[in-house]
Amino acid sequence: MSVREVQAPTLAPARPAPGRPARPPVRLTQVSHHFGDTTRPPVLDRIDLVVEPGEFVCLLGASGCGKSTLLSLIAGLDSPTGGTVEVGARRPALMFQEPALYPWLSAGRNIELALRLRGVPRAARRAEAERLLSLVHLDGAHARRVHELSGGMRQRVALARALAQEGEVLLMDEPFAALDAITRDVMHSELTRIWQETGRSVVFVTHNVREAVRLGQRVVLLSSRPGRIVREWTVPIPQPRRIEDHAVAELSVEITDHLRAEIASHAR
Ligand SMILES: Nc1ncnc2c1ncn2[C@@H]1O[C@H](COP(=O)(O)OP(=O)(O)OP(=O)(O)O)[C@@H](O)[C@H]1O
Ligand SMILES: [Mg+2]
């Protein structure tokens, strides 16, 4: 499909027909995107990407290459100027670098708000919020105010709130970038556990190669202006992984070399 064949994102039901394989929760076909000036190269250029049910995909690329733009297209916050974005019937949940919680609500109430927007009856919200807080290892934190929580705890609440949306897909835009190394390490373990427990598909954006290899089943490398998929790697290392693992380091070196070459070619 050419860039001119503009089509709005298609919302298609994700439930597979009997005997048919499950439909991918995310399918991007020849997705291109321009902001305004179409004489400049597009921010994203003919991206083809399929995310399978339960798959964990990391998107990696230099700053400004279009990672957040790609997530916002998948989230339906914007429409691509070319190509098609197909997602499941339930809108993907999106989690940002900053937790973006409502400071005047408690941790639990922030989650309950997401449940309310999903249509969960009032009587069931409290118990479901408690369950989600427990899932992110914040038992008993329902009444805590946002300002009383550490950065890592706030990100856990944000993760619980994203899970409250019950989308099939969790989109994460550098969610742990602002955390210290130890807290980030804990959050990596938590996210891996929750991903395995919930069976959601995850699309995780980062510019940290080690983080991508620590978490992802697949790492997709984007180039800059235009943002294209230049290469991808399947990560054969079994979970649970650690960021210090030799195999993680080895693959990270290989991917970093490609990322550096990509940045250098862009700088020329
Ligand atoms: N709303 C917008 N209007 C115009 N240009 C935009 C808009 N949003 C993003 N851009 C431009 O599109 C390009 C890609 O931005 P994007 O935020 O997707 O990059 P990124 O890969 O997420 O970067 P980072 O790693 O720094 O977060 C940048 O050149 C940015 O300036
Ligand atoms: Mg970004």
Image (cartoon, grey):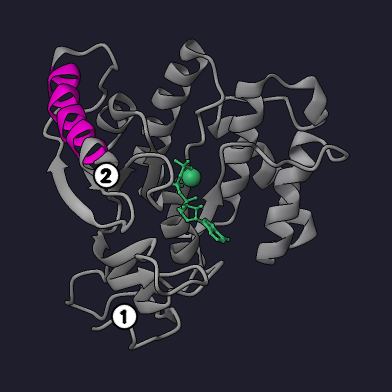
Q: Nearer the viewer, mark 2 or mark 1?
A: 2
Disc 2 within 8 angstroms of ligand 1 (CB): no
Q: Tell me where residue 98 appears, x and y as whole percent.
A: 63, 36
Measure the C-alpha gap from mark 2 to mark 1: 22 Å
Disc 1 within 8 angstroms of ligand 1 (CB): no
Q: Please, is residue 265 above or below residue 226 in the view?
A: above
Quarter of the rendering occupied by the N terminus = bottom left
Q: Please, is residue 61 above or below residue 139 in the view?
A: below
Q: Is residue 48 magenta?
A: no
Q: Tell me where residue 242 appears, x and y as whole percent.
A: 28, 17
Q: Tell me where residue 259 appears, x and y as whole percent.
A: 22, 35
Return the residue at label 1.
3
The residue nearer to you, when weighing 191 against 221, is 221
Magenta residues span 247-263
Q: Residue at x 54, y 52 (%)?
A: 94
Q: What kind of element bears circle 2?
A: helix
Q: Residue at x 73, y 26 (%)?
A: 141
Quarter of the rendering occupied by the C terminus = top left
Residue 97, quarter of the rendered image: top right
Q: What kind of element bears circle 1?
A: loop
Determine if residue 142 is in view.
yes
Q: Residue at x 56, y 25 (%)?
A: 178
Determine if residue 144 is in view.
no
Q: Residue at x 50, y 60 (%)?
A: 72
Q: Please, is residue 264 above or below residue 16 in the view?
A: above
Badge 2 crowding class, 10 Å Cα cut-off, few under 14, some 14 to 19, many 20 or more, is few
- Residue type at mark 1 is Val
Q: Is tag 2's residue or tag 1's residue first in the polypeptide sequence?
A: 1
- Residue type at mark 2 is His
- Is most of the magenta stretch helix, strand or loop? helix
Tell me, for residue 22, which label it has, or none: none
Tell me, for residue 266, which label it has, or none: 2
